[in-house]
Structures are given as structure tokens and as C-alpha cells.
Amino acid sequence: MAKHVEPQRQAGLSRGSLRLTFRVTDGAVGLVSYERLDMMCPPSVGEAPQVGKHSGFWIELRDANGRVLFHELLHSPLGDSVEVHSPDGRIRREFGAVKEHTFEVLLPDDPNARVIALLGDSLIPVTEREKLAGGSSELARFDVPRGQKGGGQ
């Protein structure tokens, strides 16, 4: 009878996911809640963006040494713009004032992860800020929550 052999897992590959809910209020971001899920997280797509070099928004999962284990590109976490489609086929972006916005992120539940970092452009709505120099930066940092589910930090 053949011996059953478990397949080897890739380093960093997690069968669980961590769902994080964040709230952006007046230019500050907070972790509202978290939940561990029994599902695989979709993989990262493309090369990880770099602070000061790339714009937009993304989230990183880092180990104790600050090494990026996983990244996820995000739509603007501010929720301060929408696409408007005209009957003639033109598409334009309209910006508006938003005081509060909530968004969710799904990350792998990697046992080596220690820090969650939100990076990107300013969290001040575009309608309220002057032209910013310097590009992207680290906007917020959180310890990876422990436990099955709960409130934020």
C-alpha cells in the first residue's frame, strides 16, 4: 500500500485569510474590525509599488524585519470620486467632499506577518487639499491582530 505524502506548501502560502475593515475619517485611518476566514486570499498582482516612486493606494503585509510578504493595490480608500458616463460615450471623474468612508481588505493570514501598512497618496480629499509634493508615503501602520475576530486598534 502506498504511503500518503502531504504536498509541500510554498513558504508564505496561507490557507486562511484576514478580512480587515478600515474607516477613513477626516484624513485619518483606523482599523474598525478584523476576522479570520477559512479561505485562500487572492494573490498579489504585479510588482509591489514603492513609496515615493508610485502613486495611488496599496496595503502591505510585513514581517518583523519590515520585509513585504504581500501587497494589494486599492481603489481610493477615500470614496471621494465617481465615474460619470455621458450618453455620448465620454467618461469623466467627479470629485466630492467625503467626511467618512469605510473599506475592506482581504490579506493572507500569514503567521510570519507582524505589521499592516497602508501606503499611498494623501487621505485628505482632493477637493480640500493643495497640490501635494513628494508623492506617496506610509499613511497608517497597524499590528497584525491576534485572535479569531474582533474590534480594531
Image (cartoon, helix red, strand yellow):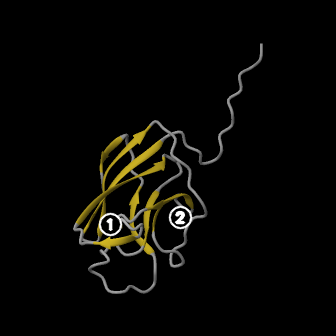
Looking at the image, residue 69 lies above or below residue 29: above
- Residue for point 27% across, 61% down: 101
Q: Position of residue 125 (x, y in %)?
A: 30, 74
Quadrant into which the N terminus falls: top right
Question: Furthest residue to the front?
Answer: 88
- State left or right for residue 25 relative to residue 8: left
Query: Tag 2, which secondary structure?
Result: loop
Which residue is denoted by mark 2 in the rendering?
66
Residue 123, labelled with which disc? none
Q: Amino acid at mark 1?
A: Leu
- Residue for point 36% across, 71% down: 93
Residue 78, labelled with which disc? 1
In this rendering, which labeled residue sits more in front, label 2 or label 1? 1
Question: Furthest residue to the top?
Answer: 1
Looking at the image, residue 145 lies above or below residue 136: above
- State left or right for residue 55 relative to residue 20: right
Q: Position of residue 21 (x, y in %)?
A: 33, 52
Looking at the image, residue 105 lies above or below residue 89: above
